[in-house]
Structures are given as structure tokens and as C-alpha cells.
Amino acid sequence: MPFYRQMGKIPKKRHTIFKKEDGTLYREQVMGTKGFSGIQSILYHNHAPTQIIKSELLKDCRVEYEEQGDLSHRHFHSNELKESGDAVAGRQFILGNEDVLIGTVNPTEKMDYFYRNGDGDEVLYVHYGTGKVETTFGTLKYQPGDYIVIPIGTIYRVSPDVGDSKFLVIETSSWITTPKRYRNNHGQLLEHSPFCERDIRGPEVLETHLDTGEYEVRTKSRGFLHSQTFDHHPLDVVGWDGFLYPWIFNIADFEPITGRIHMPPPIHQTFEANNFVICSFVPRLYDYHPEAVPAPYYHSNVDSDEVLYYVEGNFMSRKGVNEESITLHPSGIPHGPHPGKVEASIGKKETLELAVMIDTFRPLRVVKQAKNVEDKEYKYSWN
């Protein structure tokens, strides 16, 4: 993130002696990205973060993709993926490529282990449900509409509250950040950005755990899931400072950009990563030119795949999609509004739709299991 934060106790100067009350040293950890040229934070642990008593390979967690079929628009009913579990083990992926994995999870159980993604950042979009995410940087409480952004290498555990909950899961092989065109040279969000730093929530409280015993941390790296057992609680940080930490932005705080005639999808951009972007479609006023056509024009995805996750409302350009639907409109062929939707949009003043869009700049592939929840007639729904 482009602004500095500090929590807990830290020494006056980095890389200097920092002692506990018993005279022993806290263990300093520099956690940074892009070698030493990206953003970073410095954490102070009660124990060395390398101090483990057991290490083992758990499983191959690479997804299997379907064989290449015809180039067509796809529609998946993610609400039919009924399996539940914890926020990591219960993930069911639908689409992916070298840059991103996209799926959903219905977390009903507290994780009885800790987890870190060693391959890239993660975004968990909370469709419904509440709970908390405990991390090495502190605890964050989440609610519906939250984008939870978790940097690579962050040890965390999700504890959902009682009741139904669902996340859209976006795993990357890179980083997640705010759009470059909305930041100045110092990293601050500009005045014309659809949101600002005031809308971002970081960890609310830093809980330092001094417990000893056996604690499992599972690490995803290189397509495999690994297990390391610590002889102390992994959330033993007494203080930290820097620019790298987990944070939350709620979709309700995204202020839509509107115009006299239909505006292109980049106005909805919320995050960027390597070779893909994430956008937020939120309730907004329609175009106000007297002859405006609010529905989007047909357009060709010449060099990007478009994915939409439908959250709530009646998506004005689509028929037959429901909450929790996921659509894929691949590069190479045009897509656009369903029959009758252009005419129906004329004269309308606003839309109350809510959706998350992911545009990728390398082709996506469909995970094998996704065929079990696919609407196979979707590609013919423009007839």
C-alpha cells in the first residue's frame, strides 16, 4: 500500500538492538517485495520466524484444466458449489492462468491451522458473512462487500462468525495494488480517484501471542502445499512498521464515475496486478445525454478475457444470470448486451447492480470441475 503504518512497539532506529524485558533480543524480520526495491515492512517477533520443529510436503495443489474446446461465452453457477469448510481448504476454483486463479469458498469453519501464500497476493471478496482475519500484522474484521487484500507471505487465519458466508477468491502470482493512473508520484491517491486512503482499513488491533506448543503453518508455494510446525504461536509480533500489510476496502466506498454518454469499463477499475485488473460495478446514475444509450455497446475482447461475478441486483445488460453467477467472455470474439437489453435501457435513470469484474490480459482456462456447474446453453443466449 502507498502509505506508512505503525503498530505496537518498535525501536527508534531500524536494525538496532531491541530488547525484551528479560534482556533477550526481539527478532527483526524485514518482509519486502521485488527483492529490496518494492514496498516492505519490518516486524519484531518474540521468536525467530525460522524456528520450526517439523517440515513436510502435504500435497500437489495445482488445478487441472479442461481440454481446449470451442471458443465461446461461458456461464457458471457458483451457488451450486455447495461444499463448505475453512477459508483455504474449502476453495473451489473455476478459472485460471499463469497470473491468477479465480474461485469461490463457503467458509463455515475456523481454520485450525495458519496459512500463507508464498506465490502471490490474494484478494478475498466477501459476498456475505462476517468474521475476522488474524494475521502477523494484526486482526481485521470483515463484513459483506469487503475486499480483503492479503500480501504474499502473510501468515493468517480466517475465523468466520456463525452463519452462512461466501468469498470470491482471487489468487495471484504477483501483487495487488491501486491503479497507477489514480496515484501521484508519491503513491498518494489523486483527487479524481474513485476512492482514497480514508476508505482503507488496516489491521485494527495487534495481538501478541506468547504461547508455546505445536502450531501448524501451511504454505502454498510452487504449486504445492507445504506444512511447517512451529514450537511457538506464529502471531508473536510485538510491533511493526512499513508500507506492506493486509488491508480492506469495501465496495460500497467506491464512488462511480459517470458521464453524458456510456463510459468504458476502465472507469470501474479498483485494483491492478500483473496482467489483470479488478473492477467494481456499483449502483450509479446512468448517462445523462438526452439521446444516451445506457446499455454497453457490443465490443470485441481483442486482447483480454472478461470475468464477471454477480453480487446483487439486476445486471442491466444480461438475462439469465443470478447472484453468485460467474461469466467468462473470452478474447477473440465480441460480446455485449442480450437481446432487448439495449432498448430497455433507454430512458432509465440509474442501476442498482453490484458486481466484481476481472479482466485478464492472458487467456483464462476453465478448471475441470467447473463443468459440473456450467450453463451450457449460455453461449446461445443472444439468439
Image: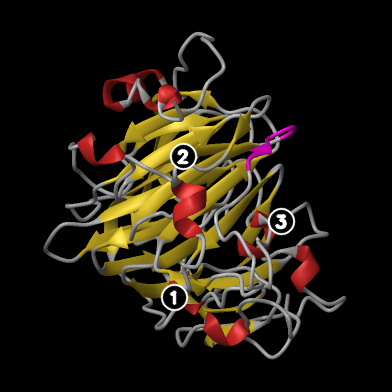
Residue 170 seen in the current view: yes
Q: Which residue is mark 3?
A: 33
Q: Position of residue 43 (x, y in %)?
A: 58, 71
Q: Which mark is residue 281?
A: none
Q: Secondary structure at mark 1?
A: helix
Q: Which mark is residue 252?
A: 1
Please state which amino acid type lies under the numbered disc 3.
Thr
Mark 3 / mark 2, whichever is N-terminal? 3
Residue 78 shown left or right of residue 98 in the figure:
left
Residue 232 seen in the current view: no
- Asked whether 23 or 129 is in front, the reply is 129
Q: Which mark is residue 338?
A: 2
Residue name at image x 63 percent, y 82 percent: 196
Find out whether residue 122 is within the magenta segment: no
Mark 3 / mark 1, whichever is N-terminal? 3
Q: Quadrant of the C terminus?
A: top left
Mark 1 Cα shell of 10 Å, populated few (<14), some (14-19), many (≥20): some
Image: 347 above or below 215: below
Please state which amino acid type lies under the numbered disc 1.
Ala
Magenta residues (range) = 298-303
Q: Secondary structure at mark 3?
A: loop
Tally of numbered discs = 3
Residue name at image x 36 percent, y 78 percent: 207
Between circles 3 and 2, the one closer to the viewer is 2
Q: Give the image quarter of residue 12.
A: bottom right
Q: Secondary structure at mark 2?
A: loop
- Asked whether 162 or 45 is in front, the reply is 162
